[in-house]
Image (tube, grey):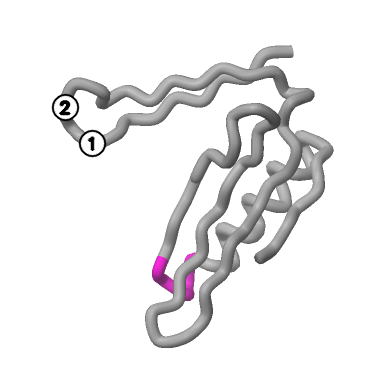
């Protein structure tokens, strides 16, 4: 089964980001966390042969729970593990 990822990027020639891959190639959902004064979290989807695709990045603590919940839901739907770094 194919999966398609589309996102608008920065204005310019390569503004559209369009990726297509097989769902079986999705290896994991990854959350990268940096704590401290300038804390942030990044939510990635790791694809075999294509590396990591960043999905969401946030600096705001109040959104953290929502992002983590979405990561859990997506990992459950795709039946892949969640990795936290």
Quadrant of the image for the N terminus? top right
| Residue 12, numbered circle | 2
16 with respect to 49 (left or right): left
81 with respect to 53 (left or right): right
Quadrant of the image for the C terminus? bottom right
Q: Position of residue 38 (x, y in %)?
A: 38, 79
Q: CB atoms at circles 1 and 2 under 8 Å apart?
A: yes
| Residue at the image position 68 percent from the left and 47 percent from the top | 29
Q: Position of residue 84 (x, y in %)?
A: 69, 63
Above or below 45: residue 21? above
Mark 1 vs mark 2, CA separation in Å: 6 Å
Q: Nearer the viewer, residue 35 or 59?
A: 35
Start-end of magenta stretch? 59-63
Residue reaching furthest to the left: 12
Q: Which residue is mark 1?
A: 10
Above or below 19: residue 73? below
Q: Position of residue 77 (x, y in %)?
A: 77, 36
Residue 78, quarter of picture: top right
Chief secondary structure of the magenta span? Answer: helix
């Amino acid at each position: 089964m194919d999966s398609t990822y589309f996102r608008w990027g920065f204005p310019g020639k390569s503004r559209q980001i369009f990726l297509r891959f097989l769902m079986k190639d999705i290896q994991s959902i990854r959350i990268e966390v940096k704590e401290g004064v300038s804390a942030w979290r990044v939510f990635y989807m790791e694809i075999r042969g294509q590396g990591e695709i960043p999905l969401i990045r946030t600096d705001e603590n109040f959104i953290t729970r929502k992002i983590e919940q979405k990561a859990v839901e997506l990992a459950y739907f795709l039946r892949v593990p969640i990795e936290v770094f």
